[in-house]
Amino acid sequence: MDKYMEMIRIRFLMMLAYRTNYYTGILIYAINIAAYYFLWSAIYGGKQTMQGMSMEQMTIYVAISWMARAFYFNNIDREIAMEIREGQVATELIRPYSYLGMKTMQGLGEGIFRLLFLSLPGLFLVALFLPLRFPTDVHTWMFFILSIAFSFIINSELNLLAGIVTFFTLNNEGLLRAKRFIIDLFSGLILPISFYPDWAQAVMKYFPFQGISYIPSMIVTESFRGQAIIDGLLFQFVWCVLLLIPIRLLWRAAKKQLVVQGG
Amino acid sequence: MNAIEVENLRKEFKSYSSRSGLIGAFRDLFTRNYKIIRAVNDISFTVKQGEMVGYIGENGAGKSTTIKMLTGILTPTSGKVIVNGMNPHKEREAFVRTIGVVFGQRSQLWWDIAVQESFRLLKKVYRVSDEDYKEHMDHVIETLDIGPLLDKPVRKLSLGQRMRCELAAALIHNPPLLFLDEPTIGLDVLVKLKIRQFLKEINEKYNTTILLTTHDISDIEALCERVIMLDEGKIIYDGSLQKLKENWGEGKQIQFTFANEMTLDILKELTDGLQVTWKKGEQANVWTAHAPSALLPEVISRVVARYSIQDMNINEISTEEIIRNIYEEGVVHG
């Protein structure tokens, strides 16, 4: 366990090594939240509620979705792809740890860093200008924290899967880009799932994406109550476990397939 | 005890080839041509604990592929590999604790952070206790002279500084077996010397087994008594460096710089009846005679008697030349 904690620390140091990225990061999150706020206030255009959500709830939904994204989002898929493309994966495989486990920990380090140093300051900045009113119920926050922990796991698992595919294709820039877009769209970050047409909502029940952003955001805006919260968390948990299966299988196949590029 | 046991080890790769032209490119979308390439072809050898072995061969001979199989990175196509009493692939995590690896062309330190942070992480990863770390690494850091570099990020180090840090990083857990894949590539003479000295020292102190691949034959001469030579995936020589030199390096080379231009015919006629081969040098008046040591006086007296010369050098045949000759012919005689 020690080594994994150490890895999180190292990731913190790495994020701090590039300070300019850090400052622009705060700005980007603030701009994103503000842009979506103005977009939604134009869409609401004086209407009280849409799909059962008030404008006030929508504001919080937007702010929280982006804040949560800072935490669950990471680039480990790209890193795995790059390490494979450049043959760097060889030096990872001669270390006595699980490569995928270590990558996940790096993602966690990155996530905690962004949450504390990018999105909280960004949120604070936005709160100065926008009317944000957060729930005061402690239980809501506890469910939310549990829920974004699941978000992180699901998203990281998808990233690992996308990264491992590089072992077979050796270059999958297109796939990674598509995956990123699909997650932003179908996770409910850009548009809450309840705004999609019924057939699309029905289809999305069978995919893990809404477990990434929609469910935690609905919990914190208190749009989900009682049983809906439990169902949401259960949905996330089931996907966390289910996604382990393809990762295991692909990883085993990938190690056999491994060709270290570049001598 | 044997540190490395390899038997009939083989590795095959699929190598895809692209068809030419636009139509060919479309056909490649559906079916692709490939052929199977044997990078390592049924090799067998053993290395005893404490040996320092040079593993040499031309580019693409299969050296790196072998090392990658020995370190558990690649799965062999067939054959048996036992390293430190374990199967590298089956027991990867336990196995890699017993080896250290330096790839000259890749860094295993984290690029953006200070060297000591990488060391600290590796110390945790290998579960090295504080006392062991202090006792062992203080010495390593001092010998390699990297103390002042520890708080600098890796990206700010020069190649020589980085290589010394890489070596130290590979030794944090004091492994009984060390793989070095071209550790001195691109380094200046002083750093090379320092690294060689250091390797010798740890070999003596801890009886560390070292398997070294390199293109710099002077590394091998300085460190290894035994060499294994690889060509097109097969072992073409396995034995002492001394013996290789004796069998191949017989005779001497005499380089003459004549006052006037010379031709091969004249020289051949001159040394007619003697076992001498002539090679032209960089200029038309520079020629090198390769002759058995016993014929040296005869060759020189014949040449000097007939032609005026400006300069003359007598050289041993260098190991590098011997090895170049073997690469060119692809087999080892004798």
Image (spheres, coloured by chain):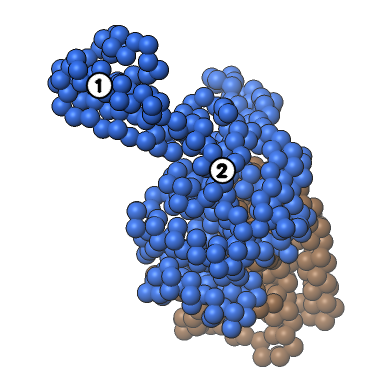
Chain colours: A brown, B blue
Disc with the residue nearer the chain's start (2 vs 1) = 2
Q: SS for tag 1?
A: helix
Left or right, A142 with reference to B306: right
What's the CA distance linking mark 2 and mark 1? 36 Å
Give the image location of residue A93, x and y in percent. Answer: 65, 57
* Residue displayed at 59% across by 36% down: B237
Residue A111 is at least partly visible in this image:
no
Q: Quadrant of residue A135?
A: bottom right
Q: Nearer the viewer, residue A189 or A101?
A: A101
Of badges 2 and 1, nearer the viewer stands: 1
Residue A136 is at least partly visible in this image:
yes
State the quadrant of the N terminus of chain A.
bottom right
* Residue displayed at 37% across by 19% down: B276
Read off the residue under disc 1: B301
Amino acid marked by disc 2 = Ser
Q: Nearer the viewer, residue A51 or B332?
A: B332
User: What is the crowding at mark 1: few (fewer than 14 residues within 10 Å), some, or many (at least 20)?
Assistant: few
* Residue displayed at 59% across by 83% down: B130
User: What is the crowding at mark 2: few (fewer than 14 residues within 10 Å), some, or many (at least 20)?
Assistant: some
Amino acid marked by disc 1 = Ser
Q: Quadrant of residue B101?
A: bottom right
Give the image location of residue A72, x and y in percent. Answer: 63, 69
Tell which subunit mark 2 falls on. Answer: B
Give the image location of residue B92, x and y in percent. Answer: 73, 59
Q: SS for tag 2?
A: strand
